[in-house]
Amino acid sequence: MLTRRIIPCLDVKDGRVVKGVRFVELRDAGDPVEQARAYGRAGADEVCFLDISASLEKRGTLVALVERVARELAIPFAVGGGVRTVADAEALLRAGADKVSLNTAALADPALLTGVARLTGSQSALVAIDAKRRPDGSYEVYSHGGTRPTGRDAVAWAREAVDRGAGEILLTSIDRDGTGAGFELELTSAIARAVPVPVIASGGAGTPGHFADAFGAGASAALAATVFHFGSLSVASVKEACAGRGFPMRWPLEDVA
């Protein structure tokens, strides 16, 4: 079995890490450089940095801040938010990102995924899918930081994105985001069954068992913010619980304090 990954997420607005519930009611969660350093030491497998207001504000990602965060990390680092062109993606990769997350711009121009994948390989092209459940049980994709419905079906878009060159999917349930109620397992399972690339489950983590549940639903990695930022869970406790459920984890942790 492949080693599963635990990924803390830095949602950044105005240069600070923030976290809310269902993409709203944001509260401050610290300095992104300090947070990245701490998570690297705590045994995180990757760190994800999302500039959550870049698309809404029609600007690029904060490249200088990305560069500062990258200097603190010796683990893979994914960056997204406001990436509109291949040149934007290339600038982030040069600043130290290992992967570039594409959402709103890729929905508008799916060929962007192909262009980014050509830079350093499909592993660097991460498509972020923010989805909400419809009354009929299907899931609709939302753009612009989860504020605009697109009419696209999440499973169909996941397949297309992979066909276009995406090497990984960051899948967020808007309904579960920040609630602590657990990942949206039906959504996770549907996407994981539909595509041949790794799926990162996001939105809803509240207990260590929720991460194991996501892996059981087919996720290769699970991402969380609230539970890590505000100290209700540690990376170590999550890994111990997942290992206890039979999912391989990366050990040892450098620092579990």
Image (cartoon, rainbow, N blue to C red):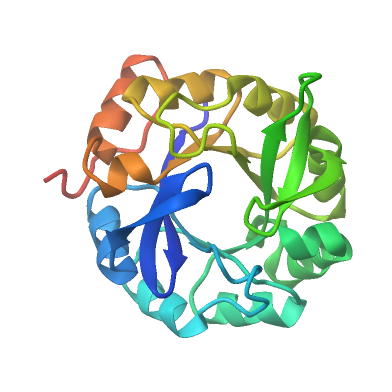
Left or right: 158 in relation to 76: right
Q: Is residue 77 left or right of residue 139?
A: left
One can see residue 195 in this view: no
* Residue 121: quarter of image: bottom right
Q: Nearer the viewer, residue 2 or 169?
A: 169
Looking at the image, the residue that sits furthest to the top is 245
x, y percent for residue 162: 80, 47
* Residue lying at 24% horizontally and 40% vertically, measured from the top left: 252
| Vertical arrangement, residue 56 with respect to residue 225, above or below | below
Relative vertical location of residue 18 with respect to residue 215 in this rendering, above or below: below
Report the number of discs: 0
**How far across and how far down the image is residue 76, in percent?**
46, 58
Q: In the rendered view, does 4 fall on the left or right side of 133?
A: left
* Residue located farthest toward the left when viewing the structure as drawn: 257
Task: Please state the horizontal and vertical placement of residue 158, each as a whole percent of the image.
Answer: 79, 41
Which residue: 70% across, 50% down? 167
Which residue is found at the position 23% from the left and 43% from the top?
253
